[in-house]
Amino acid sequence: MSLFKRLINTVRAGSVSQSEWDEIRSNLITADLGVNLTDQVITQAKSARPGEAQQVIKEQLMQWLSSNSRTLNLSSTTLSTILIVGVNGTGKTTTTAKLANLLKHEGKSVILAAADTFRAAAVDQLQTWARQVDVEVVSGVANGDPASVAFSAVSKAKNEKYEILIVDTAGRLHTKDNLMAELSKIVRVIEKHSPVSEILLVLDATTGQNGINQARSFIESANITGLILTKVDGGAKGGIGLAIEKEFGLPIKFIGQGEKISDLSPFNPELYLESLFS
Ligand SMILES: Nc1nc2c(ncn2[C@@H]2O[C@H](COP(=O)(O)OP(=O)(O)O)[C@@H](O)[C@H]2O)c(=O)[nH]1
Ligand SMILES: [Mg+2]
């Protein structure tokens, strides 16, 4: 049974025992809602009348979700650049390709930059995806400066009047100052040519509360404009999206639901809340 369904059913049935509350509490925490939000939900549930519990709790959850726009901030007249950032293995390269595919289907002209220069395989991986999507990739020399790849890519994108440049970056540990400084340098270099429209932080839903800690450090050191939650298909426990948005007030703009090119969807808060209750 889904995350909140059990809670609502229990409240509806009336007279909930302490051990039942304890069990519900531990279920919600395990579902990645975290201790703090779980306790707030339980307080609400305890004070709600049985018939109103679902309504009251849904309204509370809705308030926790970000009210910022979930659509990409794209220019209609000039190049828009989107930076994809996050720690290793969260799905940045895959998501770069998926996003290119999605935007191409919307009729946009898209070019990619392979700014993960640390691993030769990362460039190959992006190029393989790009062939499938039929978009061009700008890459540099192995172990080169990722900012110089970004520079070449933004120059080409401007000269050739592309609408959207998506920059795939190397996985970086938010705790490593030099890597975070490198990210700032990429942003500075791009912004000499054209503004960075979005810096999207990719988070792996299966990493739970640890993902929230990653997000916190990134948000402190880079100007993150939105989130992409990946691997939502892999049995992720559901509460993480809510916990992240409540914590940071940043919108989840897309969710990744698989390894195929088409497995990326705009995040729909209403559907998301429905899924927690159904
Ligand atoms: N199940 C699932 N796997 C994903 C998703 N996104 C990425 N992956 C997988 O996660 C692994 C790491 O992805 P990659 O894009 O290389 O991560 P990066 O290191 O952040 O660039 C690959 O095996 C991807 O196929 C997703 O939404 N769902
Ligand atoms: Mg990668």
Image: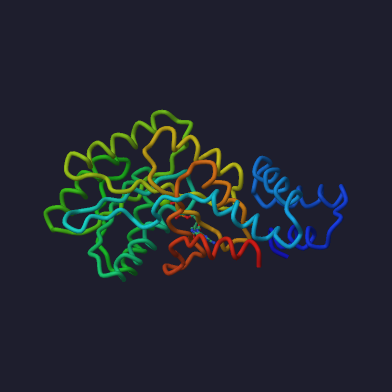
Residue 86 place in picture, x, y as percent: 44, 44
Quadrant of the rendered image containing residue 124: bottom left
Q: Is residue 196 left or right of residue 12?
A: left
Seen at 65% across and 49% down, the residue is: 32
Quarter of the figure with residue 179: top left
Relative image position of residue 147 (x, y in whole percent):
26, 40
Q: Nearer the viewer, residue 103 or 50?
A: 50
Query: Looking at the image, which residue sits at the far top?
Result: 177
Please name the residue shown 31% across and 67% down the image. 131
Q: Would residue 197 be found to the left or right of residue 14 on screen?
A: left
Locate residue 186, reporting x and y percent: 28, 39
Quarter that holds the N terminus: bottom right
Residue 112 as seen in the image, left or right of residue 263: left
Report the residue at 40% width, 45% height from top.
85
Residue 157 percent coordinates (x, y): 18, 54
Q: Quadrant of residue 272?
A: bottom right
Figure quadrant of the C terminus: bottom right
